């Protein structure tokens, strides 16, 4: 497998940039402990990726083994985001969920292209770091709770007793429509995938010795981490551009993804609409217990068009 070193490193910078913006928005604009838990996990992911990127850039020559390990690491985090994003899309195929799912799918395809369009093997589970094991655990927590909600509503579309920790608001009516006999959850293709992925995450969690994360990131701490991570990011980028001055990242017209930037003209309407949903989402429409594990809490807004609530990611 031939991996393009320059393109892989460029790809990693763009991915890290997204995650820095994401955890900052989660901690400062997200609602409830779910957002702060998600922010903490994503910030820790940024730390892991920056450390690995620093290692790669410190090498005089990056051999194939190092490039493969780095590519596998990036794929691991994208696969986890895909797991969560796909669950959100199965719950409700709206513009929010669909665009997040499409972005992650596109990034995985781009990564494959960087690796000569050959299948990039996953990291062997026995080689996952403790942090990666926890990250995978929490991704399955998110997926399971989302799909569990869809499964319970499919069994009884009129069900409302989800407990005081759920605040589904208007979202419940939409999901009840999906759960009706002719609704989305009864579509054979959708229904089968919900069941399959529900069982997959359920089995994973039942056989895992780990517990869900409890660390939270408040807005003040998030800003401190953002400042630190941006500083390291900038230093690494400058180091990279010294080696690859022709990189597209150095071009004046290069545009970084703009994560969860609220359009001023629609700020009031968007805030009201989000309150009606009961949560600030990142790719999944769910609250309370489910939202506690909704790591994509801000991504729900991350990739809408500039004419909608949020500018595109």
Image (cartoon, rainbow, N blue to C red):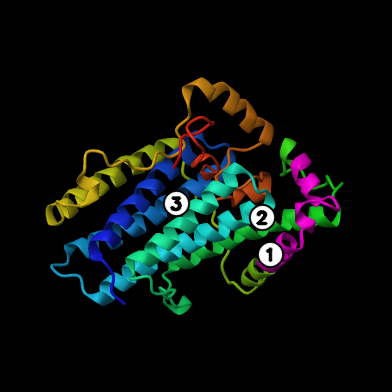
In x, y percent, where is residue 28?
Answer: 47, 35
Q: What numbered label is drawn on residue 193?
A: 1
Residue 296 visible in the shown view:
no
In x, y percent, where is residue 32?
Answer: 59, 39
**Mark 3: secondary structure:** helix
Q: Residues within 10 Å of mark 1 (few under 14, many from 20)?
A: some
Residue 24 visible in the shown view:
yes
User: How far is the residue under mark 2 from the one under mark 1?
Assistant: 8 Å
Labelled pair 2, 1 in contact (Cβ < 8 Å): yes
State which quadrant residue 190 falls in.
bottom right
Q: Residue at x 58, y 38 (%)?
A: 280
**Mark 2: secondary structure:** helix
Q: Residue at x 63, y 56 (%)?
A: 87
Count of marks overlaid on the render: 3
**Dominant secondary structure of the residues highlighted in magenta in the image:** helix
State which quadrant residue 141 falls in.
bottom right
Is residue 241 or residue 77 the one in the foreground? 241
Q: Is residue 176 magenta?
A: yes
Position of 267 relative to 301 (above/below):
above
In x, y percent, where is residue 239?
Answer: 16, 53
Q: What numbered label is drawn on residue 42?
A: 3
- Would residue 259 appear left or right of 101 to someone viewing this image? left
Comes first in the chain, label 1 or label 3: 3
Which stretch is magenta?
A: 172-197
- Would residue 99 appear left or right of 243 to someone viewing this image? right
């Amino acid at each position: 497998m031939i991996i393009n070193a320059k393109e892989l490193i460029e790809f990693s910078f763009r991915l890290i940039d997204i995650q820095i913006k994401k955890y900052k928005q989660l901690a400062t604009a997200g609602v409830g402990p779910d957002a702060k838990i998600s922010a903490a996990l994503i910030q820790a992911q940024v730390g892991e990726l920056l450390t690995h990127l620093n290692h790669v850039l410190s090498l005089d020559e990056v051999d194939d083994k190092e490039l493969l390990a780095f590519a596998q690491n990036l794929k691991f985090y994208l696969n986890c985001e895909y797991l969560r994003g796909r669950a959100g899309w199965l719950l409700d195929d709206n513009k929010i969920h669909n665009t997040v799912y499409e972005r992650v799918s596109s990034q995985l395809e781009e990564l494959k292209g960087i690796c000569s369009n050959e299948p990039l093997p996953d990291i062997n589970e026995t080689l996952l770091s403790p942090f990666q094991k926890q990250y995978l655990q929490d991704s399955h927590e998110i997926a399971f709770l989302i799909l569990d909600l869809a499964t319970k509503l499919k069994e009884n579309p009129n069900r409302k007793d989800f407990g005081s920790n759920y605040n589904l608001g208007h979202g419940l009516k939409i999901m009840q429509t999906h759960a009706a006999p002719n609704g989305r959850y009864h579509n054979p293709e959708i229904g089968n995938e919900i069941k399959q992925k529900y069982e997959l995450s359920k089995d994973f969690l039942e056989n895992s010795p780990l517990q869900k994360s409890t660390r939270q990131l408040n807005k003040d701490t998030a800003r401190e981490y953002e400042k630190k991570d941006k500083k390291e990011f900038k230093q690494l980028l400058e180091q990279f551009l010294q080696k690859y001055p022709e990189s597209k990242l150095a071009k004046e017209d290069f545009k970084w993804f703009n994560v969860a930037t609220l359009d001023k003209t629609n700020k009031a309407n968007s805030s009201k609409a989000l309150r009606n949903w009961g949560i600030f989402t990142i790719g999944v429409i769910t609250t309370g217990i489910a939202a506690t594990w909704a790591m994509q809490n801000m991504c729900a807004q991350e990739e809408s068009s500039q004419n909608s609530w949020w500018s595109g990611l």
